[in-house]
Amino acid sequence: MTQGVETTPVPGLVVLRLAVHGDARGWFKENWQRERMVGQGLPDFGPVQNNMSLNVRRGTTRGIHAEPWDKLVSVATGKVFAAWVDLREGESFGATYWLEMDEGVTVFVPRGVGNSYQALEDGTVFSYLVNDHYVPGTVYPALHLADESAAIPWPIPLADADVSDKDRANPRLAEVTPMAPRRPLITGAKGQLGRALAALHPDATLVDLDELDLTDPDALAAWPWQDHDLILNAAAYTAVDAAETPEGRATAWAANAAAPAALAAIAARRGIPLVHYSTDYVFDGREVEGGHREDEPFAPLGVYGQTKAAGDLAVATAPKHYVLRTSWVIGEGHNFVRTMARLAADGVDPAVVDDQVGRLTFATELARATRHLVDTAAPYGTYHVTNGGTPRSWADYARRVFELTGHDPARVSTTTTEEYAAGKQLSPRPLHSTLCLDKLAATGFESTDADQALTDYLAHLG
């Protein structure tokens, strides 16, 4: 049990005063008690490895080392003088803090903060509980123990201390390359949604299939997940009709179900929030008053919808997850709105289905909702995200595109889904794709009206 949690001048560095129960036999303490410590403000950092170092002689001094993982440091036996220097990129670079530690003190050290200590008694044992595995041969930032800017007041002068040759060769602060912060990872970065997400996360790492194949276990295992604090999975197989073919079916299941499952396992193991994007195709398109809600049972009509539903279920196994279901996405690239604008300009009079009803979702709106949910720490779970306003048919939107681009909307004729599909190898389409936005609105997000967004989109097409 902790007796108190104290903050320090180094952001994220937290000191815990532990209750130590002693008698004539010795003492006992709860060195790591997840429920109580997290409840008092310690991050739920998910430790995976415990390291211990024995310091035979008083004066043994180790550090100053910064690693790309969080750690909970404590004394198993003896007493130490411990010091920390912030070696992370940012305004707090070079900030310091020190204190004396015995068995009653534990300190949480965030990723990138340099850790060091000096044994004040013979036979001191120091313990590290860390949330990533050590990789031999990897070099991380380090600082000289005698750095003048840190000015650590070592109780035992370093000239009299037992210091390794390696630590004596560590650089001064001016020569240290700060540890870069964790960054979001955006998969499917070349797609319409990926590009919109990248615009709102300029520091993100952008990958597509050629940089990271999410269906390749070896590629996933080799990826430096420790460098990321958020996964935005915009990668998907969206060839709805091709998914009904033998080759397309296998590809769709790999990309839309197996890959999200693999990402969910990684996110769960490393405590990384995972945002995944889904579709109205997980439902059968029956008309629902107010639109389909997040808890409606799945009833996909085709292979594409089946694989996306499987992906939704897999992602939900990650404790920190958002599944954002959407419909009729319009972004930078080939899409319905651009096609209608081109047909209008080329003098083509299209026949467009009028029995499929829903709302457009502009990729910028989906990206904006993503940023909102993450930044406000909205409760994890599934959310429906589209633009707002009155649901319309594809034919209605086509006429509106013609009108906004200066063409006669009467040039757009109508057809039914059944008539349009006659003689074609098409996947079945849900007829009613309107998604209820109440759950999203409850988080404080105001959806932009689809009609206004369409007007703005076409104005920027030139």
Image: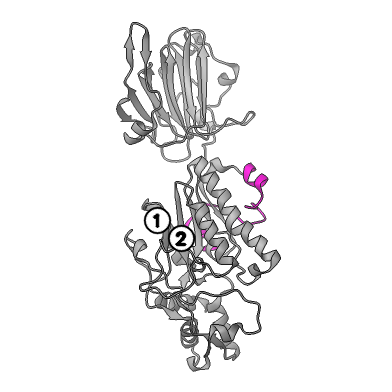
Name the residue at 39% across, 65% down. 293
Residue 255 rendering spot, x and y as whole percentages: 61, 58
Quick check: marks 1 and 2 in contact, CB under 8 Å? Answer: yes
Find numbered disc 1 in the image and state the secondary structure of the residue it sits on.
Answer: helix
**In magenta segment, residue 203:** yes
Query: Which residue is under mark 1?
Result: 373
Q: Left or right: where does residue 59 sit relative to residue 242?
A: left
Name the residue at 49% across, 75% down. 460
Q: Which mark is residue 96?
A: none
Q: How many marks?
A: 2
Is 352 above or below relative to 91?
A: below
**In the image, what residue type sits under mark 2?**
Leu
Residue 220 rendering spot, x and y as whole percentages: 62, 46
Is 102 above or below relative to 401?
A: above
**In magenta segment, residue 6:** no
Name the residue at 67% across, 55% down. 210
